[in-house]
Image (cartoon, rainbow, N blue to C red):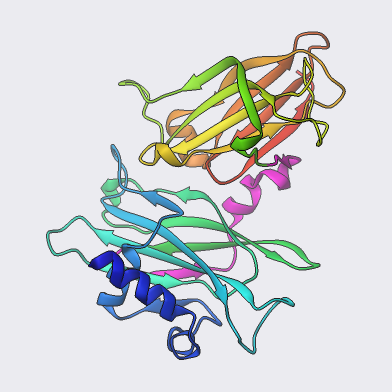
């Protein structure tokens, strides 16, 4: 019944009355606790449920896409994204706080940017989003939230200086699983163990594609390096990216460069790929939402 009610409310999101009530033109904190709880039950884009010495509350990111006939459209499309961020305490009768970002034609969750340690009480978690503006490129937006308050952060030096494109990285494309014919070789896996806690898990494989229409070639015909990344608490919803091995080469896994608490602080896992022939190196940064690469000279 709760899920049915949630879906009904989500459908009503697309009505002018609810759109007006939530004021989706700007960052809005939802004051209705019951409404926040319903949003908490919808499908998840990203979820943090607490681990070791970090936050004592839960944060989830929800998203919906619909047709909004509004007067503040930032692009020539009625289809726009609603992003909802919900924080909840672990109490038996939890405090629930929800907020919406303004409507946009292309929102993307980027990473968990800041997890204050539990010693700081319920200090807010910081989330980073990518907002694509037609003809204007990308804009980074940050939300700080806990179960009691939320705020939009206009500027974040930490966010801009650690954002991979600002450090010379290029984005990797997503790999559809129906394009993968078989796994040729397992290059490496990262799983949580007792000594090194991870926020993400990852598999790095060499795979053969069903076709070569995109010219994605590596050491053999129709082969690419695939990267499958998932949140630790949502392993069934892994996202796959591919590395386009330009100019051929015999690419192999190098080493993990960003794992454990360091990767949690950065918001990405990191590793290298090495061409055995030329000894060229590629640095990879990835999480379940975005992945990036950079050619480097070791």
Q: Is residue 75 above or below residue 139?
A: below
Q: Is there any visible trace of residue 95 in the rendered image?
A: yes
Q: What residue is rendered at 65% in x and 22% in y? A: 207
Q: Is there any visible trace of residue 148 in the rendered image?
A: no
Which image quadrant for residue 149? bottom left
Count the marks.
0
* Magenta-colored span: 146-173
Q: Residue furthest top?
A: 277
Which image quadrant for residue 272? top right
- In magenta stretch: residue 161: yes
> What percent of the width, then of the height, locates residue 96?
27, 67
> What percent of the width, then of the height, locates residue 212?
79, 30
Q: What residue is rendered at 74% in x and 77% in y? A: 76
State the quadrant of the C terminus: top right
Image side of residue 38 versus residue 20, left or right: left
> What percent of the width, then of the height, locates residue 204?
58, 23
Q: What residue is rendered at 45% in x and 79% in y? A: 13
Image side of residue 128 versus residue 219, left or right: left
Q: What residue is rendered at 32% in x and 80% in y? A: 31
Which image quadrant for residue 73? bottom right
Please name whichever residue, 20 or 16, is drawn nearer the observer in this view of the structure.
16
Q: Is residue 175 above or below residue 163?
A: above
Please name whichever residue, 148 or 200, is drawn nearer the observer in this view of the structure.
200
> What percent of the width, then of the height, locates residue 235?
41, 36
């Amino acid at each position: 019944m709760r899920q049915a009610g949630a879906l009904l409310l989500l459908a009503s999101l697309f009505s002018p009355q609810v759109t007006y009530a939530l004021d989706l033109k700007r960052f809005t904190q939802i004051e209705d606790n019951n409404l926040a709880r319903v949003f908490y039950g919808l499908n998840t884009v990203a979820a943090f449920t607490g681990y070791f010495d970090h936050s004592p509350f839960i944060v989830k990111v929800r998203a919906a896409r619909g047709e909004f006939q509004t007067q503040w459209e930032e692009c020539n499309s009625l289809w726009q994204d609603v992003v909802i961020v919900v924080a909840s305490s672990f109490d038996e009768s939890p405090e629930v706080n929800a907020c919406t970002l303004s409507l946009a034609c292309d929102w993307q969750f980027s990473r968990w940017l800041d997890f204050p340690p539990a010693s700081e009480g319920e200090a807010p978690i910081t989330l980073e989003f990518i907002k694509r503006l037609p003809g204007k490129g990308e804009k980074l937006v940050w939300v700080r939230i806990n179960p009691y308050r939320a705020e939009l952060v206009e500027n974040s030096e930490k966010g801009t200086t650690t954002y991979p494109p600002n450090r010379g990285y290029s984005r990797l494309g997503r790999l559809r699983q129906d394009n993968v014919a078989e796994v040729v070789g397992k290059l490496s896996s990262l799983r949580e163990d007792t000594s090194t806690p991870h926020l993400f898990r990852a598999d790095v494989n060499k795979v053969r594609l069903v076709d070569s229409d995109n010219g994605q070639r590596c050491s053999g015909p129709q082969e690419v390096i695939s990267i499958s990344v998932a949140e630790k608490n949502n392993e069934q919803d892994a996202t796959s990216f591919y590395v386009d091995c330009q100019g051929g080469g015999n690419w192999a896994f190098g080493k993990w460069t960003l794992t454990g608490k360091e990767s949690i602080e950065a918001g990405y896992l990191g590793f290298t790929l090495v061409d055995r022939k030329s000894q060229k190196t590629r640095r990879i940064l990835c999480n379940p939402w975005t992945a990036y690469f950079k050619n480097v000279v070791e």
